[in-house]
Amino acid sequence: MRPMHQLVLDAVKETRGQQLTRRDALRGSAKFAAGGAIAASVALSPAMSRLIAAQEEFEDDVDVLNYALTLEHLEATFYEMTDDFELGEDPFGNSINEFIGRIGEHEDAHVETLTAVISDLGGEPVEAAEYDFGVTDAESFIATAAVFENLGVSAYDGAGQFLTDPGLLTAAGTIVAVEARHAAYLNLLIGELPFPDSFETPFTPEEVLEAATPFFVTDGGTPEG
């Protein structure tokens, strides 16, 4: 069986290549209906519930920001494992541990900022969940990091349209630009071409949920999937 990070990465790549009409068809397909039934039948963390609720509708800017915070928690928690692996040097002779450590610091900053903004707006910031990353070595760590950064770019691009405050939209743009640079670096490390297409492919909340779910642990103590 292929490692979980590779299965998810393949799914992300496949979705990136789909045309808009194909994505629209998938939204109403039995595949998503079945996924929703499974999700509803188990006790999920508040973070996963946030992702599932986003499939219906964002009620306000706080809801959108909490959606982003859910993914930032996922990334920030993941990068806490950076020092657990010897990641070697990148093609330019730089320490991968050092550079990915900086990515982790960026994600921590994103968590802190989103948490503060949500609180300032009178909302309740969603907390980090329990995760099962399925990482066993340096290769799977870097591959999973690439999954998260590419997913983050598409998630922000897809959710930006729901923000009503122009200032928040600008702030989100400053985050997604950094996530895109992270993704380009990690794509290079896993042997993928880091050079982008003319336009990025935004993900719907349904698509983000499908890609992120395997890394969340339910209240029952098992990964959701």
Image (cartoon, grey):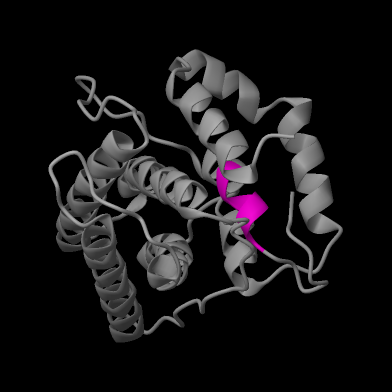
Image quarter of residue 169: bottom left
At a point 43% along the width and 50% down the height, the residue shown is 148
What residue range appears in magenta? 211-216
Picture layout, residue 214 above or below residue 61: above
The prevailing secondary structure element of the residues shown in magenta is: helix
Residue 162 lies left or right of residue 220; in this view the side is: left
Res. 175 image quadrant: bottom left
Give x and y (percent) for residue 26: 63, 24
Residue 213: in magenta span: yes
Q: Is residue 194 above or below residue 182?
A: above
- Seen as rendered, the residue at the extreme right is 41
Depth order, front residue of 100/34 = 100
Along the viewing direction, whichever of 205 and 142 lies nearer the viewer: 142
Residue under the image location 40 percent in, 60 percent down: 68
Front one among 163 and 138:
138
Q: Is residue 39 magenta?
A: no
